[in-house]
Amino acid sequence: MSSEKDDLRRIRALSAQLHQHNFRYYILDDPQISDAEYDRLLDLLQALEQRYPDAVHADSPTQKVGAQWGPEDFVADHLPPVQHGVPMLSLENAMGTDAVLQWVERVRRGLELQDEDANPPLTVEYKFDGVAVSILYEDGILVRAATRGDGLVGEEVTGNVRTIRSVPQQLTDKNPPACVELRGEAILLHADFDAMNRSRSAEQGLFANPRNAAAGSLRQLDPRISAKRPLDVFIYGVGDQQGIDLSSQKQLVDRLPGWGFLASPFLRSVDSTEQLLEIYQEVLESREQLPFDIDGLVIKVEGVELREQLGMRARSPRWAIALKFPPRQETTRLLEIQVQVGRTGALTPVAHLEPVEVGGVTVSRAGLHNPQEIERKGLKIGDQVVVQRAGDVIPQVVKSIESLRDGTEKDFHFPDKCPACSQQVWCPEGEVIPHCQNLQCPAQIRGRIEHFASRRALDIDGLGEKLIDQLVTEGLVKTPSDLYRLELDAVAGLERMAQKSAENLIKALDQTKQRSFCRLLHALGIRHVGERVAQLIVDSQRDIDTLMAASSETLEQIDEVGPAIAASVADFFSRDSVRQEIEVLRTAGLKMKADGPPAGEALAGPLSGLTVVITGTLPNLSRDQAKALVIAAGGKVTSSISKSTDLLLAGDKAGSKMEKANKL
């Protein structure tokens, strides 16, 4: 039996430990323990505080959500959304020189270069390992800054970007363009990152790496705190531009210093694949001496006309590619392999490792995907293994080092029964991932509820993993529709749930009745149906009854919906339990049909069928307002002039788009 003195010492130790984990999770984006382990520590602290209520301090982790640090250290949960006028797309990745040579050949074919010795004009520059940012200037004045987000919609960070020393508030230009959107990477130089970490107290802890520190600094709630973080922005591209014609990468880079910006210190023009590979090897060997982090090279076709000829994919341009460096590798010990059960019943093995730092990030877990991967890599418990971060992001076990075995290693046997419910598992025909077939499996129930409530699905505020675990454990929720049967008193009666918290949850559930049919379809957790597929299906099957009646053959006619997806959807809605679930959700008031026309379908109006380009400074409207009016009138807005353009809406300083339109 522990003494009161020991218990009070334990309270102080647990409080300090939890504050540190809060800080690493909320601020550094670098959690060191699992959610389950965090909850265990928090439960232990709460139990001790209930025994000694006089020992509860106002700054105890049990008394507030998140880290104890003041507002200067909190990162914003929700920043205002910003729609990018020109999509801020990602780049296709080439994971090695063979892939980039194949890309060069595709570019040659796209540009119809007949001569075997002809090569497209290319530029090569650093791929900074930071955070992408868009900075918009109108008449030379900084008016808005945003993160990349999903490429179409980012988060506004204008106030924070204004504090960055290498971002001018006003372009140093006597005749600035009407509009220019500059795109770059927010980074921390190694020296600044080290100095920032040295200035932090032992209680605050260190930032994990420059990239994470840059991301957290850019997304602060208080711009005054961003001002204390020594960020820099290197510009590498341009989005929208009006009243100026930056038609090549060299023109952009040459212009930036005159505006007061930092341009990439490395820009090479290449005219042969041999030269390209030489540059790659040169930079690969010298990257450790650079004053900032890079994770590859960016290769671009030089010239706007050639880029327009090559065009774009849905997520990336055809005229650029990122040639990634091989991931850094380290050696550590495989401690155990745990099998997790997902919401669809999939059993996924996860490697638990002795923590090791890989490229500035501590890695202690890595996904192993399926039993065949464990067998193929010859993994045994206790093995010394090689670990890397694929794409410098995702932890990955590469291989075991058999020569270091000492005989104490143990074979891993994949379970033939579900670790969550002990039911027999099976492997669907043609697949390699075993599944639990028990729809009442508690792990699946938790997973389905978590997915249903997730931000990208129905976004139920306040319904996190811990509360879901309580609801499932108490038998209050077995299906998503059970959420809408919850009674206030039952929720308020749960451990650590106050009346106000219960009221907020009921209110949040009521708000989901305004979510779109598309989001509901995604929230149902149908196998193979993510956000995009859900939208494609809703564009074709406009209400739930039509969808439930559709055969797999009908669904297969939808663009991008193949046989596997169609069969999965048809099978899902053929189940009696699913149809009963839909009826409960319908009765609860959730939307069961699409609002408005299908995505991508123009509204009827005076501009129906017409493609419109907006350029220059309009006297009474912003560009976003003008775009909204065009769309409302049935038109389609694009960012560049082409033969398909029907109308050009031109304001002051229309620039090159007006000239190009006059030539068509």
Image: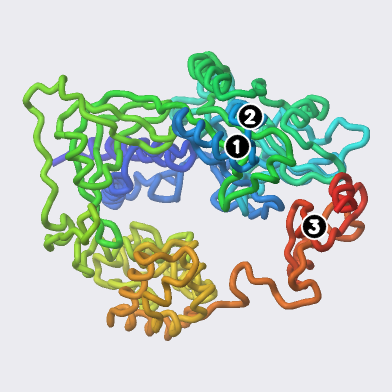
Q: Quadrant of residue 190?
A: top right
Q: Identity of the amino acid at label 3? A: Val
Instruction: Give whichever of 419, 391 is nearer the camera.
Output: 391
> Is disc 2 placed on a helix, strand or loop?
loop
Q: Secondary structure at mark 1?
A: helix
Question: Is residue 124 visible to us here?
Answer: yes
Within-10-Å neighbours for mark 1: few <14, some 14–19, many 20+:
some
Amino acid tagged 2? Ala
What secondary structure is marked by label 3?
strand
Mark nearest the camera among 3 and 2 is 2
Residue ID at (55%, 40%): 106
Q: Are marks 1 and 3 in contact (CB under 8 Å)?
A: no
**Residue lying at 68% horizontally and 71% vertically, measured from the top left:** 602
Closer to the N terminus: mark 3 or mark 2? Answer: 2
In this rendering, position of residue 441 left or right of residue 572 = left
The answer to whether mark 1 and mark 2 are in CB contact below 8 A is yes
Task: Provide residue 607's location: percent of width, then percent of height.
Answer: 79, 72
Q: Residue at x 51, y 31 (%)?
A: 101
Residue 108 disc label: 1
Q: Is residue 614 above or below residue 406?
A: below
Q: Can you identify the residue that label 3 sits on?
A: 613
Does 80 appear above or below 338?
below
Residue annotated with mark 2: 118
Q: CA distance from mark 1 to mark 3?
A: 29 Å
- Of the residues shown, which amino acid type is indicated by label 1? Arg
